[in-house]
C-alpha cells in the first residue's frame, strides 16, 4: 500500500495561502485511507500550533500527522541518550518536544546544547552555548537551513547560527532535520510505513528530494514552492518526477509515476 511524506511550506501552502489542489490532495489521502505525514524543518512551533495554523487556512491536518525537526530531534535524542539535560536555544516547538521526553532544560553543565530556530537569537545565549560546548556539552541542531523567509527577504536560520557557534568552538553540530534520513525514518516509523512503498513530496532539491533519495524513497518535486527547472538542473541527482503542484497527484494517487509499482504491491 502506498504512503506519502510531504513537505509543508511550498507544497501545501505558501505565504499563508493554501496552494490550489492541496485540499483535494489531503482529502483524497483521507478518503482512500492512505497513510501520510506532513514534514517541516520549522522547529519553532509545536505540531498542535501548526495544525491550528493549517486549520485557519482550511487544511484539516491533525497534530499527530505533523512531524517537525523539533519532534524528530527529541525522538533522536531520547533514543540516543534516554533522559538527559540540555541547554536549549529555540522556541516552544523545541522546548515542548524535549520536555515531553522527560529532559531537563538547564545551563548548569548540560549533556547537550540543542540549537533550533528562533526569531530572537541573543548574544548572551550564543555565548553561553559556545562556552558549554567548549567545556564538553555535545552539540545538536534541529536543521541545517541557512536562511528562512522574512518580511524583507530572508532571515538567518539555524544553519547560519550554528556556523557561528562552530567558528567559536571548533565543533560541528549533528543536524537531525531534513535532509538527514533520520528524520525521514522516524516519520515513516510513526505511521508504520516502509521507504520502498512511500513517496516523498517537496519543493526543494537540497532538503526534500535529497532526504527522500537518501532514505530510499522515490520523490516528487513540485514547482509550487521555490524550485524551477533551472534549479533542478543545478544538482547531480534528480527527483523521480516533477509536477506543477500536488493537484497533479489527485487523479494518480495510487500510481504517481505511471509504472504500477504501488498498485502491484497491493
Image (cartoon, helix red, strand yellow):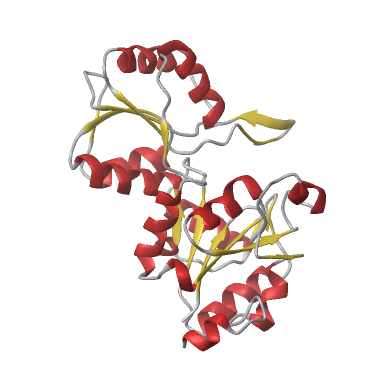
Relative to 30, does residue 9 appear above or below in the rendering?
A: above
Q: Is residue 198 left or right of residue 56?
A: left
User: Residue 69: where, in percent of width, then height?
Assistant: 45, 46
Is residue 121 positioned above or below 10 on the image? above
**Residue farthest along the front direction in this orientation:** 236
Q: Choose between 208 and 9: the one closer to the eye.
A: 208
The picture places residue 198, in percent across and down from the top left corner, at 50, 70
Instruction: Please name the residue shown 71% across and 72% down the image.
Output: 247
User: Is residue 30 toward the left or the right of residue 245 in the image?
Assistant: left
Where on the picture, by quarter, is residue 6? bottom right
Q: Is residue 34 visible?
A: yes
> Can residue 124 be seen by looking at this rendering?
no
Residue 255 rendering spot, x and y as whole percentages: 61, 81
Extreme residue in the left direction: 83
In the foreground, 66 or 211? 211
Q: Residue at x 66, y 79 (%)?
A: 250
Query: In the image, residue 244 lies at what x, y percent?
Result: 77, 65
Give 45 or 128, whichever is nearer the viewer. 128
Tell me: residue 145, above or below residue 111: below
233 left or right, relative to 105: right
264 on left or right of 206: left
Residue furthest right in the image = 230
Where is 87 relative to 195, above or below? above
Q: Residue at x 31, y 16 (%)?
A: 132
Looking at the rendered structure, the number of numbered marks drawn on it comes to 0
Amino acid at each position: 500500500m502506498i504512503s506519502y511524506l510531504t513537505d509543508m511550506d511550498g507544497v501545501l501552502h505558501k505565504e499563508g495561502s493554501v496552494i490550489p489542489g492541496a485540499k483535494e490532495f489531503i482529502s483524497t489521502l483521507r478518503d482512500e485511507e492512505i497513510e501520510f505525514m506532513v514534514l517541516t524543518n520549522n522547529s519553532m512551533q509545536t505540531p498542535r500550533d501548526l495544525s491550528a495554523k493549517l486549520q485557519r487556512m482550511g487544511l484539516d491536518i491533525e497534530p499527530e500527522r505533523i512531524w517537525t525537526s523539533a519532534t524528530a530531534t527529541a525522538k533522536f535524542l531520547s533514543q540516543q541518550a534516554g533522559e538527559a539535560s540540555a541547554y536549549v536555544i529555540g522556541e516552544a516547538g523545541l522546548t515542548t518536544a524535549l520536555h515531553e521526553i522527560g529532559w531537563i532544560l538547564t545551563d548548569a553543565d548540560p549533556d547537550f546544547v540543542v540549537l533550533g530556530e528562533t526569531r530572537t537569537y541573543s548574544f548572551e545565549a550564543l555565548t553561553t552555548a559556545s562556552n558549554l560546548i567548549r567545556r564538553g556539552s555535545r552539540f545538536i541542531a534541529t536543521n541545517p537551513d541557512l536562511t528562512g523567509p522574512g518580511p524583507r527577504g530572508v532571515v538567518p536560520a539555524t544553519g547560519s547560527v550554528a556556523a557561528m557557534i562552530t567558528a567559536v568552538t571548533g565543533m560541528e553540530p549533528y543536524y537531525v532535520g531534513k535532509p538527514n534520513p533520520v528524520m525521514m525514518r522516524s516519520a515513516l516509523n510513526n505511521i508504520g510505513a516502509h521507504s520502498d512503498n512511500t513517496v516523498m513530496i517537496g519543493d526543494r532539491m537540497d532538503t526534500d528530494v535529497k532526504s527522500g533519495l537518501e532514505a530510499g524513497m522515490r520523490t516528487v518535486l513540485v514547482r509550487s514552492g521555490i524550485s524551477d527547472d533551472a534549479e533542478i538542473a543545478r544538482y547531480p541527482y534528480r527527483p523521480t518526477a516533477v509536477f506543477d503542484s500536488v493537484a497533479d497527484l489527485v487523479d494518480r494517487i495510487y500510481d504517481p509515476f505511471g509504472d504500477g509499482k504501488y498498485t502491484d504491491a497491493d
